Image (cartoon, helix red, strand yellow):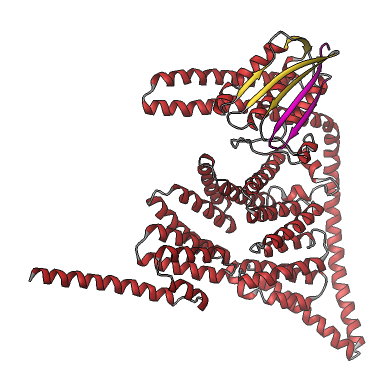
Amino acid sequence: MKPLIFKFFTGFLFFLISILFLFSETQAKQLVLPDSLKQIFYNEKKLDRRFELINDHASNELNASLSSSIALYGIFLADSIKDKKRLARAHEIYGISLNKKGDYTSGIENLGQALQLFEQLNLLDDVAKVKRTMGETFRASKNYELAMTYLNQSLFYFSNNPDPVMLARIYNRIAATLLELWYIKDGSIFGSFLSSNPKISYGAKLALDPDLKVKDDSLTNTIQASKFYASNTKRYDLIISTNIIEGSYLVSTKQYEKAIALFEETVQLIERERLFEDLALIYLNWSRVYSIGYLEEPEKAIELSKKALEIAIKQDIPVYIFMANNTIHSNYAFIGDYESAYNYLKQQVPLIQEYGEKDLLTQLKTLEFQYELQESERELQIKQEQVRIIVSGIAIVVVFSSIFIYLLYRNNNKQRELLAVLSKKNLIISEQNHELEQINAEKDRFFAILAHDLKGPIKAVSASLYLINDDLKSGNIESAMIMTSAVSSAAQRASDLLSNLIEWAKSQRGKVHVNPKPLDLTMDLQDILRLFEENLKTKDLHVINELRDPIPIKTDKDILDTVLRNILSNAIKFSHKGGTIHIRATQEDEELVLSIIDEGIGMDQEMLKNIFKLDAYNSRPGTAGEVSSGLGLILCKDFLVYLNGEIKIESEENKGTKVSIILPLHT
């Protein structure tokens, strides 16, 4: 009797589970999916393979509505079998598809569920990937503070667990966030800066404001970092996306020719690689070049925006449809074609509530009135009611003339007051201008040297502390004590270097003062190499120093040491782990040639040609991801002029670089 009851109970339980599964399957099948996809999904009996098909189709589908429907089917299926990992992945893909549609609130909700599930499963890679996507979603919804928080968390993880593709994605989204935050949004820090002094180039303006130049360098370096990792992994989709960000930056900074060339190049890349996901966004950004407030060629702006609109409609991306319609109607209104402007603006009405454009109805009514007025005037002309037109025209002229005269009078009063204030300020500015130029130049040099030269010792301290932490955890006290000594030594060297740099900067006020004294180059170089001991150990680099005998020269030690530190830092930074650095010196007539040769990643001829140009983007990360400003060699060239010396660079990509400095033996 008992076995019979047991069989009945287990059979009934199996029946209930089957019913629940079939119910979830029925829910999933009620989703709106094309018959071709239904056939593919439902015919695949293996769950692993079915989930792969669902994820691939949802991720690669260009139509946002279809993509979200496929992803939602994945959620139903994963939930029906209570598979946490698959459910987390399904929520992640569904959140991404909702973002494409502009539904950021639901997108964040689903991404949050994915994040919680991945954290419960301790899948750290997936946690960091979802945080990157959440950062992008917060950026799209204009919450830049939260966007940077999640993006930086993701960057920290993948910097310690390198994944070039993810690093390219993260740097791409950080660049997009910084671009909107600093350059594009209302009240951005670069807004008034870009509109001031229109006759001065963007680069010249940046030279006058070091703080903004630091931010500009940060954005451009982030763009280049994304391109570097994307190029190395041949991820053309990420190269395309980053090109769009760079193009928008060039448009915002009024570098129109460069922007147009980049957009043309990117469209060619899209067509060559058949990667059409961002094509609408390319045309939207391209149309900005010709829009109101920029080059103001509305016909071209309309043409490009119509291309973007056509693609956005096919891909069912409401936010792009909204942006394209907005650009088209504003440019039609600009050229006085109110009928076309009105027709395109009407298409915005269904999107008004979703995107909160509260003033759009007012614009619509205004354009509708202008259009009706235009039609009324045509009817009056046809009926030859010339008298009424003249009277109306006179009335309008009188009203607007009165308003114009009043505004002109008020404006003249304000201008007189402003001119009085400006005349006083101009006197002060003219007296301080020369001094400010010198102070700014000195401050720029000082900050560049300070950041560049302190990086090595500080990184050594960081690496040693990491090792000490491991030793303490493992109970290896003796090793920890040894490393503590190394930390103390590196910190002391960094402190000495900082003191020297501060004293050097103080001595530079007004002009660079050269104080040549007798110096043994061999001993001086050995002292400098000791600064980089920890860096060399970290990358397992071997230095072959051929300087054995004393080499007496007469020069300024502080300036020469700065040059040597920069060159050695670059050699270490761009050398592969386990590589070799050679140092040799030769004497030619009354000149000394000191060469530092590495076997690292080298440079191509284009980079080598622009290596000493401030307006060229020469920064790139080291072989271990070290940050580089691209200023080191420029500083070396400037400083060697004060020593009556020069610098020569020979390099070949993937084979290494030889940097030679030529100094007079006697100054």
Name the residue at 84% across, 56% down.
411
Name the residue at 79% across, 38% down.
610
Name the residue at 63% across, 68% down.
358
The boundaries of the magenta stretch are: 645-667
Residue 248 percent coordinates (x, y): 72, 55
Can residue 397 be seen by looking at this rendering? yes
Q: Nearer the viewer, residue 476 or 379?
A: 476
- Whether residue 652 appears in magenta in the rendering, the answer is yes
Residue 242 percent coordinates (x, y): 66, 52
Q: Residue furthest bottom?
A: 383
Can residue 208 be seen by looking at this rendering? no
Q: Is residue 389 above or below residue 87?
A: below
Q: Quadrant of the N terminus?
A: bottom left
Residue 640 percent coordinates (x, y): 79, 22
Magenta part mainly helix, strand or loop? Answer: strand
Dividing the picture into quarters, in which one does residue 219 lie? top right
Drawn side of residue 514 relative to residue 30, left or right: right
Residue 614 percent coordinates (x, y): 78, 37
- Whether residue 456 appears in magenta in the rendering, the answer is no
Name the residue at 70% across, 8% down.
549
Q: Nearer the viewer, residue 11 or 193?
A: 11
Q: Nearer the viewer, residue 92 or 61?
A: 61
Q: Is residue 647 above or below residue 521?
A: below
Drawn side of residue 272 relative to residue 480, left or right: right
